[in-house]
Amino acid sequence: MSYERRVLLRHSLASIIALGLTGISRFLYNVIVSRRFGVEELGRANSLISQAFFLAIPLSFFAVALGKYASEFLGSNREEAVRSITLPSFLLPLAGLLLLPFNVYLSLLAVFRGIQLTIRNFLYGIHRGEHYAYLITLAFLGFLTGFLVHDVFAPYLLFLGFISAFALVYLVKFNLIGRPRKRELKLLLSYSSFAFLGTLSGVFLIQGPYFMSEYLAGAEVAGKVSAVLSAAFLLTYLPQVLQSAIMPLFSYKYGKNENEYIKFLAEKTTRLLILVTGAAIFVLMLLGREVLSFFFSFDVGPAFYIALMAMEVYISYNPSIVALNSTAYVRNGTIVALLGAVISFLSWLYLIPLSGSIGVMLGLLLGYWVILIGSAHYSRKLLGISWGIYSPLIVALALQSLIFLSKIALLIGFLTFLAYGRKDVKEILGLLKFFRGRES
């Protein structure tokens, strides 16, 4: 088995565990808090958590660059260069402690989240993603323990606090801290200045719906948005599994000047994600609204369907924008992400007061569409990635919109989608090609 295949398999399996538990934790948190404290308290809690997670992005300013260059340096056998960029990357999140006098929960959650993002990118960057899976599994036990405390923030404080403590021990134990050097710091700063804006935009589209809905429509609407997105965002862990696995390989191959492999990998993963996600969303539209409404004890409404379609668009553009950000084109990926975030923000100012949770999902869908169009344009122009890989997405969204007519119409649409994609299904189910990759 080639090195690339081993990394893909290890990181994919590790990510399935780590991201799966992370996604489940958010869903469990929303269900339990909703039932124990009520929908308004759920909205307020998620608003503060989302603000903390948003603040964690500047605190983890170097995280994405740390993962990219750790992998690139590894590909060029520069292990000392890897050590030189760890210390500034992990010290920066501690700046969030300055917020302690204003809000203890906000400060600690932001710091712990910043460290989590940094250790995650670092472990995948040095091709030890399985260690992150072990960490999340243990931290999840702390998360569950937090529900024994009558504090709405205790589960996340224990979950993220454990991860932060582990990060310190891990860096010391494996001697991964070195003296910062000017050459590597310059690279870290240069890349991060653009990667940061792109990451900030992406996180705004994930965390923004919670606090924007509370500010513009009140805690009850924020609670409904929390319920819908806690389920819909579970879908986004599928591309994050692949992203965690393939981003280090994009950078690793870029370090070896093997650009054709980057195009190959991006196209294969995009087609896989569109087909698998499309089929999953048809099933969720048929059954999910009733199940979710049962869990939360209120009807989540048609906003659930729009949220699923927004997630489908997000998942579809993910490999292309990751390819841009992992190579020499981080500026292009950042511009696209910023534009999508701005479009969503402006649309929310109008749509949320007008139509509540439905307005949140429509604004999210619009922002993701802008990012998809932009990333498709740049990935075609700069990496040669075909626009044709998105045609199944257009078909899927058109057929999924039949849910607003009836579930019978949607079922017919589902069968039509499967018939349309039968050739692609056979090709994708030769996923063996994907894992075989191209021998280096």
Image: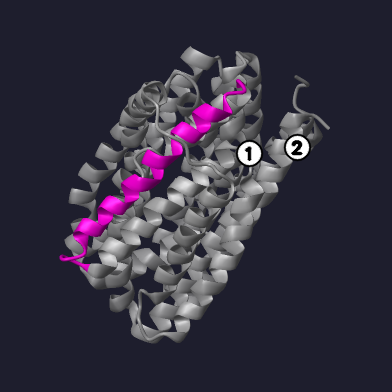
Instruction: Tell us which disc is closer to us: 2 or 1.
Output: 1
Q: Which residue is mark 2?
A: 6
Which residue is more in the foreground, 365 or 64? 64
Q: Is residue 364 visible?
A: no
Q: Position of residue 120 (x, y in %)?
A: 51, 47
Q: Is residue 421 magenta?
A: no
Q: Position of residue 51 (x, y in %)?
A: 27, 58
Residue 259, placed above or below residue 85:
above
The quarter of the rendered structure image containing the N terminus is top right
Q: Residue at x 43, y 20 (%)?
A: 329
User: Residue flagged by tag 1: what amino acid is it?
Assistant: His
Q: Residue at x 42, y 68 (%)?
A: 156
Horizontal arrangement in the rendering, residue 262 relative to residue 364 (left or right): right
Query: Which stretch did the figure color magenta?
Result: 76-103
Q: Which residue is mark 1?
A: 127
Cα gap from disc 2 to disc 1, whole angstroms: 10 Å
Residue 11, placed above or below residue 97:
above
- First of labels 2, 1 by sequence position: 2
Q: Secondary structure at mark 2?
A: helix
The quarter of the rendered structure image containing the C terminus is top right
